Structure formats: C-alpha cells, structure tokens
Image (spheres, helix red, strand yellow):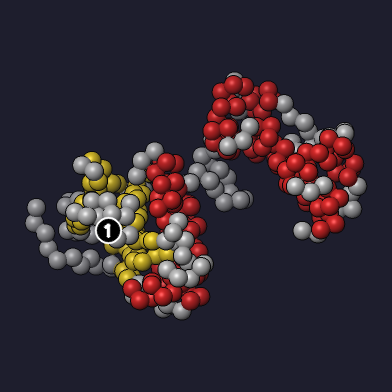
Amino acid sequence: MIRKKEGFQGQRMIVIPRNILSKNCAKEPVLTPLYITDIGYYPKAFFHHRKRAHGADQHILIYCIEGKGSITIKKETFLIQAGDCFLLPRKWAHEYSADTEDPWTIYWAHFLGSSAAAIVDTAVKEWNGHKIFLPHSEDRLEQFESIYQQLQRGYRQENLVYSNMNFWSFLSSCIYPGISKPGKAKQHHNSIDQVIDYMNNHLDKMLTLQQMAKAVNLSQSHFSFLFKSNTGFSPIEYFNHLKVQKACQYLLFTPLRIKEVAMQLGMEDPYYFSRMFTKVMGVSPNQYRDKKV
C-alpha cells in the first residue's frame, strides 16, 4: 500500500508540551487521575496510518464519525465505521489505517493519569471488548469541541483543569452511551433503568420483589440476578437506599417529624424507619437533621 506524508485538509491537533504535562498535570492533585496529552480531529484522513510495535506511551481513544478504517491489536483486526469508538491501552502493540477509498473522519485523544488504566479497563468490561458503537450525539461532539477550544487558549492552570475535568464527562458519555441527561427521553432504557425509575416513582410505597419484577416483565429470580449483577445491591436494598436518600431531603428541607417522614416513605413504623436510616447513614434521623449536613 502506498503511503504519503500526512496532511488532511481541515485537520486540527494539539500536543500538550511535555514540560507542562510533567509540571502542571502529573503533579497537580486535581489532574493526576486523568489528563489529556494530545488531542485532535482528522477529517477525511486519506493515507492516515500508524504502526507502533511497542504501543504508545499513552492510552488512545479514536472516535469515527464518517468513513471507514481498521485497527489491529493482538493480531485481531477490527473494521471501524461511522459511530464506532475504540480504546487502545497504553503500551499495547497496534496498527491502524484509514480506508483507502472512504477514509475515516475521527476525533481522537491520548491520555494518561493514575486512573487512566482503570478507566480503560472499565470501558473494556462495559463494552465487552475495545470497540463500541455510539449513537450520534451532538452533545458529545460539542463537549469534545469545548475541550479542544479551551486547550487551544493555552496552558494556564484553569484551562487545563477545566478541559480535563470535562474529559472525564466525555469519556463517561462514551463508556455509558445508554445513560441520557436528566430531562431527556431515554431511548435505550434497559430493565435496570426502568425499574429504578419505577422505584423512584413509588417511594411512598413498600414495593415487593414481585411488583418490581412484574414492572419489567421478568421472573423474580432472573430480575434479582440481573439487578444485583448490574448495581451490586439486591433490589430491596437499593430501594431502601433510595428511600433514605429521599428521607435526607425531608429532614433537611421540611419541618416534618420523624414519624411523618416515615409515613411519606410508606412506613407505618417510625422505629423501623429509624433503624433503616441509621444503618445506611451511620447516624439517626434526628442526628442527621441536627448536623445540617
């Protein structure tokens, strides 16, 4: 395959100076967990090609919005098309190329930090691999642009902190694309999302496991397994946590007595409510209210 020197019309790229990374990112407590080292946008990237026998010194995210390309890691080649997002772990040998006839348009970023490897591992576990298809989102693209433009203004500490804190959010939207912003319709509800919404809408009731499972048309045993696997808690335990969360709001923002708070949460026995609250929060309802947390 013929290669030529790269240069894509409309390409943009920022490479953070390495002395800035070492002095202002790697040693800054706010930035140490995660920080961008390089970031860019390559439109219609004809002849774009990289081969790193020993991998890169950073983790790499590639997000394709048009065209096609391919990425090879550990002797496995992945076709990359519009909507695909791919994560390359640091120090992993890899090769990637734009398609010769329909070259990709990509947003990309290199990143490091004490939490970076764990973030990549979380994504790989969530995606069941290194690649995921992301539904189109103007919000996600606007956030990337905001990060880029802020870094383009220079490397004052507030620019670096603002950009990299936003990068956390950008990565979250890639790792968990099914979670929408509050106030927007959830187009990709799964059973767990639905039942948590159901719980929140019935905090004034004492829901049973049977009612929760029925709300998402699952058997009790299958529902319990899915819920525990997804959240780390049993459905009833999670529901009680939501009740306690609501109780905290009542205690801080209303003059309701403990008995009345319990009644608002569907509990006729205020002593049972107090015991549950204390178990979750580590203090009694009265102590929580007095502390004005």
Look at label 1 and name its amino acid: Ala
Left or right, 90 with respect to 230, comes to: left
Which x, y percent locates residue 29? 51, 68
The residue nearer to you, when weighing 198 against 283, is: 283
Residue 129: quarter of image: top left
Q: Position of residue 131 (x, y in %)?
A: 35, 44
- Residue in the picture at 24% in, 67% down: 9
Residue 129 is left or right of residue 184, and the answer is: left
Who's the residue at 83% across and 35% down the image?
272
Which residue is depicted at the point 74% across and 47% down?
Answer: 281
Tell me if residue 205 comes above or below residue 17 in the rendering.
above
Determine which quarter of the picture holds residue 148: bottom left
User: Where does label 1 land, which residue?
Assistant: 56
Residue located at (20% from left, 42% from top): 75
Residue 116 % position (x, y): 42, 56
**Is residue 282 visible from the viewing direction of this image?**
yes
Residue 140, given in percent of the width and then of the height, sits at 46, 56
SS type, badge 1: loop
Number of dots carrying numbers: 1
